[in-house]
């Protein structure tokens, strides 16, 4: 465990500096006292860690120093070759070159594990029955984000100048987090109608944390989505299908199995909208009966009569 932490510490110092002991302790999940001991251990092993006092001080490595990639575990080497969505960002060629250089630098046993993973795992970020091509402006947005340049985007018929702060891939969907004149906003990239990089630097808040921002935003987004309750009677053997159809945020409120001997259950199921409920419950056919609200029950009955008439007429 400590050996892995020492390698991570050396790589953090190599990536940037200086780091205070407190920053490193928070990043590695240990105490500042442990960081001081780890730094001493790195120095004894020949890593030239420098320490500087004062408000702008901390630990750093001298310019040009590079550690070797001998600290990778077999699992980490495999994970590096399970392809991330680099092609969609216009970085596929760079990723392939980087992986080739990394592969050449790995010890033989790790090289075999990485090659093994690359030939057995492939990540497809698309979704069935949706266009597999990435949004047309994604590469341009990613380029401006990488270069810290301002963007002009067309969104819902309007042009907006924004400062890109991050891109998030949620399932098959890309989201752009950007600073606007009205504060930080989140845009679905496939709903952006155009994007052009501007000859102006983006203003990026120094303390902006993309992962923390996304966690807070997505939680708030989910909480503000509405719910509608639908009272149903469902066959006991179709309870699993009903759970799969319900809104995932309140699916846990449904029982996982019917009581012993029960032929059916009467319960409330939650959906985001009534039309979603209608679409999902129609898939269950005669295994479910909508009891309320009356408007949805009437629509389900209309569907049932139309289907019966079609088959009776045949």
Image (spheres, rainbow, N blue to C red):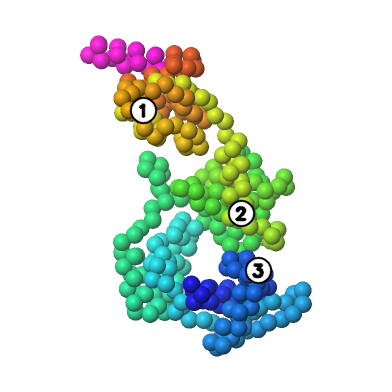
**Which numbered disc, 1 or 3, marks the residue that appears first in the sequence?**
3
Q: Is residue 196 left or right of residue 82?
A: right
Q: Earlier in the sequence, mark 1 or mark 2?
A: 2
Dot 1 falls on a residue whose secondary structure is loop
**Can you tell which mark lies on residue 23?**
3
Q: Residue at x 46, y 27 (%)?
A: 269
On the image, the x and y values in percent for residue 47 come to: 56, 85
Viewer-proximal residue among 163 and 237: 237
User: Residue 52 location, x and y as percent?
Assistant: 71, 81
Q: Is residue 39 magenta?
A: no
Pointer 2 residue: 212
* Residue 102 picture quarter: bottom left
Q: Earlier in the sequence, mark 2 or mark 3?
A: 3
Q: Label 1 belongs to which residue?
A: 259
Disc 1 versus disc 2: distance between alpha carbons? Answer: 42 Å
- State the predominant SS element of the stretch in magenta: helix
SS at badge 2? helix
| Residue 308 sits inside the magenta stretch | yes
**Crowding at label 2, few (<14), some or many (≥20) Cα neighbours within 10 Å?**
few
- From the image, which quarter does the C terminus lie in? top left
Residue 63 visible somewhere in the drawing = no
Residue 314 position (above or below residue 213)? above
Q: How many marks?
A: 3
Mark 3 falls on what kind of element? helix
Quarter where residue 203 is shown: bottom right
């Amino acid at each position: 465990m400590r050996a892995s932490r020492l390698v991570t510490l050396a790589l953090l110092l190599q990536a940037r500096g200086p780091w205070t002991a407190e920053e490193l302790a928070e990043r590695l999940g240990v105490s500042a006292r442990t960081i001081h001991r780890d730094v001493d251990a790195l120095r004894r092993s020949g890593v030239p860690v420098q320490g500087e006092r004062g408000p702008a001080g901390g630990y750093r490595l001298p310019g040009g120093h590079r550690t070797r990639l001998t600290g990778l575990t077999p699992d980490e080497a495999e994970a590096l070759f399970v392809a991330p969505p680099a092609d969609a960002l216009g970085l596929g060629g760079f990723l392939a070159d980087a992986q080739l250089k990394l592969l050449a630098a790995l010890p033989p046993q790790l090289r075999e594990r990485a090659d093994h993973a690359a030939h057995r795992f492939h990540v497809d970020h698309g979704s069935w029955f949706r266009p597999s091509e990435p949004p047309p402006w994604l590469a341009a947005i990613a380029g401006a984000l990488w270069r810290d340049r301002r963007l002009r985007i067309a969104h819902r018929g309007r042009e907006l100048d924004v400062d890109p702060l991050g891109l998030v891939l949620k399932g098959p969907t890309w989201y752009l987090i950007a600073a606007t004149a009205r504060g930080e906003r989140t845009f679905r990239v496939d709903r952006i109608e155009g994007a052009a990089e501007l000859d102006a630097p983006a203003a990026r808040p120094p303390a902006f944390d993309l992962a923390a921002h996304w966690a807070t935003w997505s939680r708030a987004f989910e909480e503000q989505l509405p719910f509608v309750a639908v009272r149903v009677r469902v066959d006991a053997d179709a309870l699993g299908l009903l759970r799969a159809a319900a809104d995932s945020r309140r699916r846990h409120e449904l029982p996982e199995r019917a009581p012993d001997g029960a032929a059916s259950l009467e319960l409330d199921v939650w959906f985001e909208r009534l039309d979603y409920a209608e679409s999902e419950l129609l898939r269950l056919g005669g295994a479910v009966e909508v009891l309320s609200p009356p408007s949805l029950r009437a629509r389900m009955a209309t569907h049932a009569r139309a289907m019966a008439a079609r088959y009776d007429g045949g």
